[in-house]
Structure formats: structure tokens, C-alpha cells
Amino acid sequence: MPIDYAELLANQVVSDQRYVLDDAAVSAYVEAVGDSSASPATAPPMAIAALSLRGVVQDLAIPGGTLHVGQELQFKGAVSPPETLDCRATLLQNSVRGDWRFLVVQLEVEDSSG
């Protein structure tokens, strides 16, 4: 069933996923982006961001052709695989300007140590 984005409310959790970040996932990311500087001991921060965004895109059923206008990222520590990541996305704003709908989503990711 398609999502009616007009019904989504501010402060509503729109995605709550758990992922295991393992060596295979990190290797796949490193290969996909051609990151030759990646350390095998820690996951690249953008690998964590990409993995965590997957749940938001899936749970919100974001259609192809959607524009991603911007993002701000803050990382508080390194993550070493294997690690379980809890990813929760909360809708902060849902607005319409002209023919365009804008969703502002806050995504928080925690490892097993919080």
C-alpha cells in the first residue's frame, strides 16, 4: 500500500531498523566507492551512513526520481566490524511548497555500546 506522505506527522518514527555491519558489508562499500584509503579495522563513516539510510528509503517507500536536497552528518566514534547498528529515523518536518513536498528526517545510529 502506497504511503500518503501528507499523513506523516512531525516527531513520528518513520524507520526503525537493525543491521549487522560485518566485514563483507564494509568490503562491498569500499569496493563500490573505490576507497583505497579504508582501514580494515574500522568501517568508513560513509559506509555506516549508507547502510543506515537504506532503511529510511525502504520504509518511506521513497520513489525513484526523488531529489535528495542535503544532509548534515556528525560522527561520534569509530565502528569496528562486526557490529550491530540500531538505526532510528524520526520525521522532523513535513511541508509543501508549491508542487514540492519536503521531508526533513533525523537519523540516529547507535552501536552496541550506545
Image (cartoon, helix red, strand yellow):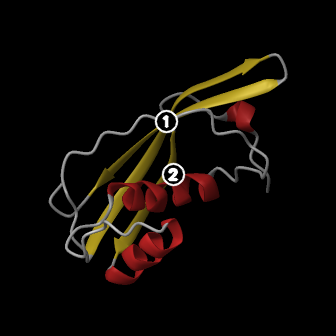
Residue at x-position 33% and y-position 55%: 45
Residue in the image at 70% along x and 49% along y: 62
Picture coordinates of residue 33, whole percent (x, y): 50, 65
Q: Position of residue 8 (x, y in %)?
A: 64, 34
The front one of 73 and 17 is 73
Q: Which of marks 1 and 2 precedes in the sequence?
A: 2
Name the side, left or right, on which 111 lies relative to 60: left
The outermost residue toward the right is 99
Looking at this view, is 40 or 87 the one in front?
Answer: 40
41 relative position to 103: left or right: left
Kind of residue sitting beneath label 2: Ser
Count numbered badges in the picture: 2
Q: SS at mark 2?
A: strand
Label 2 sits on residue:
15
Q: Is residue 3 above or below residue 83?
A: above
Quarter of the picture holding the C terminus? bottom left
107 to the left or right of 98: left
Residue 107, how many percent across, how many down? Answer: 42, 43
In the image, residue 111 lies at what x, y percent? 24, 60
| Location of residue 41 with respect to 12 vertically, above or below | below
For the residues labelled 2 and 1, the Cα–Cα distance comes to 17 Å
Viewer-side residue, 65 vs 39: 39
Closer to the camera, 54 or 78? 78
Q: Helix, strand, or loop for circle 1?
A: loop
Seen at 26% across and 77% down, the residue is 82
Residue in the picture at 49% in, 36% down: 71
- Disc 1 packing (10 Å; few <14; some 14–19; many ≥20): few
Q: Residue furthest left?
A: 113
Residue located beneath label 1 in the image: 71
Residue type highlighted by circle 1: Gln
The crowding category of the residue bearing disc 2, from other C-alpha atoms within 10 Å (few below 14, some 14 to 19, many at least 20), is: many
